Image (spheres, rainbow, N blue to C red):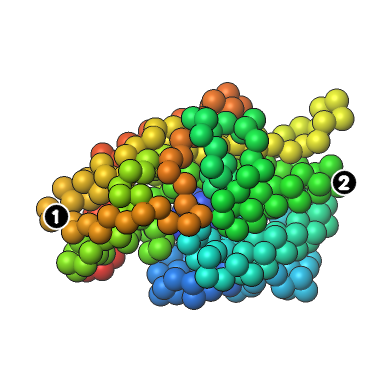
Amino acid sequence: MTVLVTGAAGFIGFHVALALAERGERVVGIDNLDPYYDVALKRARLARLEALGAFSFRQLDITDGEGMESLIADNPDITRVVHLAAQAGVRYSLIDPFAYTRVNVDGHLVVLDACRRLARLDHLVFASSSSVYGGNEKMPFAVSDRVDTPVSLYAASKKSAELISHAYSHLHGMPQTGLRFFTVYGPWGRPDMAAFIFTHKILTGEVIPVFNQGDMRRDFTYIDDVVGGVLGCLDSPPAADGGAVPYRIYNIGNSKCEPLMRFIGLIEEALNRKAELDLLPMQPGDVKETYADISDAQRDFGFSPKTAIDQGIPNFIAWYRDYHGL
């Protein structure tokens, strides 16, 4: 079996591709190596993957329709796709909103339209985000909740991708599952996310901006648990029983709503250093709390996160020290 992983040089994509290759799958990875964050980190991830005989890589932007068509033509044996390539980041969407429609909407459509030509495709799993829940106040967030009030363009682009996927599943019978990820962290993480930012600033003695005066809560989800959820979902494609559209949505979170200040405290403890905080008002486009209801994923493919932040944060810090030679 051959699996296509888009965004293979990214944080989640790297870990998913690694897990697939280690369990014996042939993995074709693509990534455009966008300089949104340090390309050296992306290349270091790829170096780990390319050391595996089961992994091959092609530098390719998902908005390149001809390139995607060529990729599919060269790999007709692809039976599963994990589509993780995206323009990430809520705050950056305030700076360059057009990047989000170009990649997360237009690029998503290019991937779907190329993949529908795969004669043997039995499942396409794509990345969505907890951001689609917007300003919902009901906790925990459930996939049955309405998600038509996004508070950032990033969230709107991810909800748009969900709708496009549903239409393609309906029109072409393409089995698809969208996964709404909740604040993923861990080794090889993204430099624009909280764990990386806080660790760097504490070590360099810089002030950490903390929004909403620190009164924030997040469902922090460790990368190994996310990978387990992705693979479990990938192995359980939705069926078109009784004429139903073969399309599903699930939350992938730790199902624990942790105070942001506790998260920072665990980083301080692991580094044995205190943080200097700058308590600021709420950032536009941000939300105060996230909290995942994962009961559907537990029922349908046995998703069971095991890593609390008390364990996950020290794991991340150990990797950070090693990667940076500290």
CA distance for labels 1 and 2: 55 Å
**Residue sitting at x 53%, y 65%:** 94
Residue 171's tag is: 2
Q: Is residue 213 left or right of residue 107?
A: left
Q: Is residue 288 left or right of residue 156?
A: left
Query: What amino acid type should be assigned to the residue bearing mark 1?
Result: Lys
In the image shown, does 224 or 63 lie closer to the viewer?
Answer: 63
Q: Residues within 10 Å of mark 2 (few under 14, many from 20)?
A: few
Expressed as whole percent of the image width and height from the top left, the position of residue 30 reads 60, 66
- Whichever of labels 1 and 2 marks the residue nearer the N terminus, that label is 2
Q: Quadrant of residue 221?
A: top left
Residue 274's tag is: 1
Above or below for 187 versus 294: below
Q: Helix or strand or loop: what does disc 2 sit on?
A: helix
In the image shown, does 1 or 252 lie closer to the viewer?
Answer: 252
Q: Quadrant of residue 135?
A: top right
Expressed as whole percent of the image width and height from the top left, the position of residue 309 reads 31, 40
Q: Quadrant of residue 71?
A: bottom right
**Residue sitting at x 65%, y 56%:** 157
Q: Helix or strand or loop: what does disc 1 sit on?
A: loop
Expressed as whole percent of the image width and height from the top left, the position of residue 26 reads 60, 55
Q: Is residue 37 left or right of residue 7?
A: left
Q: Quadrant of the C terminus?
A: bottom left
